[in-house]
Image (cartoon, helix red, strand yellow):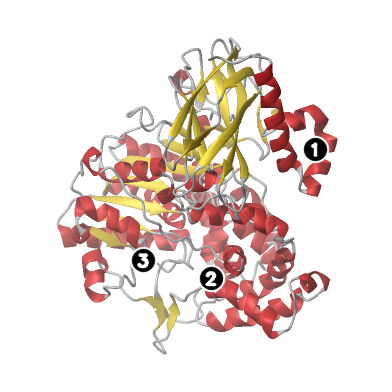
Amino acid sequence: MKKAVSLALCAAILLSVCGIFASAKKDDIEYNGYPVILVPGYSSSFMYDTENGKQAWGLDFGKVGGMVLDSIIDLGISLGAMTVGNADKIAEYVGNGIIEMCAELPCNPDGSSVHPLERYYTSAEDMCYSAILERHPEGGYMSEPKIAAEIAKYTGYENIFNFTDDFRMGSEFCAEQLNDFIESVKEYTGSDKVNIIAISHGGQTVSTYLALHGDKADIQNATLAVPAIGGAGFAYDALMGDVHLDEDCIARFIEYGNNVEPDIEWLLKAGQLGFLDQICNKLIPYVLQVIGNWGSIWDFVPNEEYESAKKFRLDPEINAGLIETSDRYHYEIRPKVKEAFETCRANGMNINIIAGTGQPIVTGLNENSDGIITAAASTGATCAPLGKRFADGYTQVNDCGGKYKVSPSMTVDASTAYLPDNTWFVEGMFHGMMIYDSYAFEFMMRSLLDDKLTDVYADPAFPQFKDSAAASLGVYTEFTGCMPGYIDSGAESLKITNCSLKSNITVTSVTANGADLYFALTPKVLKPGDSMQVKFKGNLPEVGKKEVDITVTYLINTVTPACTRTQGYTIMNGDGAESNVGFADAGVTLLNKLIGPTLTGILKKLGLNEFLSMIYAAVYFFFNSLKGMFVN
């Protein structure tokens, strides 16, 4: 529990995502021979103060959450007492600790650094992974070491290079540092081009680089994983001083990132952890003393929120320099990204984007995201409001040559994306967690090293939309004979797979909401990785662009014994449904559909909605089976 709370607090204070091991299918990738530059996520660079030689960054910020809990012990305050005014004391204790730990990191009101900070290593020779490993066999000063290890299976460590930047500065500044580093790598290797894998903030840096220097044609493959191209909602929440942690989302984030079954979220719900909001909001003034004048924080603010945040937080005279550089990014550089991508692709560069969808922002912004960055900001796609979907029969914004660009759950319209034919979406995947989803990781490796993945139609194994099959999601479903996420007359059965790495599951019921489909299920124990196929019959509507939810209820041998997973499917079995303007509610269970929105709202406030919906789905399945409505 202490570890979970610590991680939750750290996520609210600072973004830092660790790499986790996964493995690509080596025989399926044809390496193009170009050196690889890894442009990592936020806060990945090590820096020091040139005046006193003190390390200024590279600290273990995982200790921050522990500081909070230690302070509770020091002050003799129980978790229950937190709700009656003691958040101030905790915030003061931890906030002052943060300021002390980060004494060299603040920037002046104009955005320049208070202290003269330098990166430890900047050249290609020094930042080649083989050189880093020689200096630091334990892996120090290396970003994403486990991703690098997978890449090295194809390239060797001598052909992988770790870009570092002063991530406090604005995106334009970081892009110029990247420009210098690319030149250094080209000179060091003798190659005329490089491949780039960019993660999160690295994606914003690379997109800015392409807007400024894309005409140099220095890049062969640019793979942008969960990129912060259009900003990150947490920055706006922090600058406005209004953080409302979504404890459930944080718990699921932790589960996803640890490849474990859905247990932590239930523990956090039971723990009544609303007091975390109090701590985080009281901590914000302390944190802003460190990061409030960082150009990168301001570049993270989405364009639509930028002016309100600037008016609330910055002084036109005192912060004039910071405003000037941030204005230039928001109003001159960021709007050029889409055009720059298109131009670079027309000149032969492969640019592919992969993003996660279906989660709220952990710090309170209730938009479709990967938990940190909205899907719209990462990709340029049009998204339905979180908790809603596009109405049946929805017509996508842009025609895209007749190609259908709406996600199976009908929540994402990729026709407006920066690159409609070169953007992939993984429903349910959290930020920076590509390595926990075999599909996303395999895509990332192939897109980076192999020139054949030229668009979302180049390989049927990599469709534009895919639901995540990470271990923490329990089960994964697909209709056989159909594209993943869609159902048509060619559907033969529902394939159910146990995603867990260590636990058996027993599938107890399968229900459909939105179509009269009935599943012939005999409960069966599935070992980790095993699958079963369930026949179905019923009335599949002869219509297209209509959404149906498929819910699997299952038992698992963990702390949380009974679980469900719902996946949205689009029926593509005829002409498009009659279009209804606007949105429909997403994720409406059979129980919610029966009792209506008022009672549903009451159940959600009581924390009973998921539990009772699970019971109702099982009962519904049982009575349908008694009616003899199933196929043998």
Tell me which label, 3 or 2, sits earlier in the chain. 2
> Which residue was labeled with disc 2?
111
Tag of residue 600: 1
Residue 69 pos. (x, y %): 64, 75
Left or right relative to 353: residue 239 = right
Q: Amino acid at mark 3?
A: Thr
Left or right: residue 306 compared with residue 197: right
- Eye-nearest disc, 3 or 2: 3
Of the residues tagged 3 and 1, which is closer to the observer? Answer: 1
Cα separation between marks 3 and 1? 49 Å
Q: Residues within 10 Å of mark 2 (few under 14, many from 20)?
A: many
- Per the image, the residue denoted by label 3 is 164
- Look at label 2 and name its amino acid: Gly
SS at circle 1: helix
Q: Residue at x 50, y 51 (%)?
A: 228
220 or 132: which is nearer to us? 132
CB atoms of marks 3 and 1 within 8 Å: no
